[in-house]
Amino acid sequence: MLLNRTRFAGLLRCVSVAASLLACSSLLFTLPAMAQHSKKPKKGPAVALAPLLLKVKTDHASYAASDDILFTLSVKNTTTAPLVLHFNSGQRYDFELRKDKGTKIWQWARGRMFTMMLSSSTLQPGASLTFTDKYHPGSADTPALAPGFYTLVASLTTDAKPTPSATMTFKVK
């Protein structure tokens, strides 16, 4: 079947309308999630970013320079309704270590590859998600830690702005 100019123009209009509808529908699904996370996070081990409660912790308050450090991020739905979290890739969380005046010395996601796919996850009322990782000082991807105080920043990598995150400080002896 040959496409004449009229049929081709009609086909282009259909594709254009379909693209517009797709853009609008993804905007409708994204805006509620962004609106739900509109409050700025506070510093400290637990951050209420309505309707999420984020907690970050380590397995100890202080460490020897060679000790492994276990990081845990907990995310809780504090509402009475299911909460849909939207993600722009296969990455769900991230951990960063910062020294002194916020200088980033390590990031969990650096050098990792994630699927490039839009996805969502439903968190039921009162339910929690927990993410953990172990920092091995002095290995290929994790620098040895000099004595001092370090800030751990844990983030939930949703498409919400600002990014839901929580911080805490620990000591290396």
Image: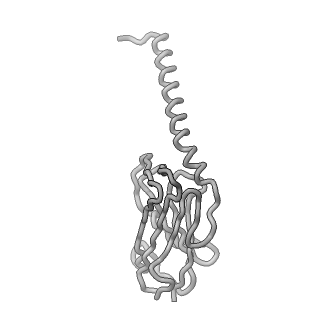
Judged left or right of residue 34, residue 139 is left
The residue located at (53%, 55%) in the rendering is 79
Task: Decide: is 161 above or below 110.
Answer: above
Q: Residue furthest front?
A: 80
**Relative horizontal placement of residue 36, taking residue 157 as reference (left or right):** right
Residue at (40%, 55%) from the top-left corner?
Answer: 114
Horizontal relation, residue 48 to residue 68: left or right = right
- Residue 127, horizontal then vertical, whole percent: 44, 59
- Is 166 drawn above or below residue 122 in the view shown? below
Please state the total of marks drawn on the protein image.
0
Quarter residue 45 falls in: bottom right
Compared with residue 132, is residue 59 higher up or lower down, i.e. above or below? below
The location of residue 120, given as percent across then percent down, is 44, 48
Q: How is the image coloured?
A: one colour
Residue 93 location, x and y as percent? Answer: 47, 61
- In the rendered view of the protein, which quadrant contains the N terminus? top left
What residue do we see at 41% from left, 70% from top?
133
Q: Quadrant of residue 48?
A: bottom right
* Residue 8 screen position, x and y as percent: 46, 15
Vertical placement of residue 155 versus 141, above or below: above
Question: Closer to the camera, 11 or 37?
Answer: 37
Furthest residue toward left: 1
Which residue is at the front of the view, 95 or 125? 125
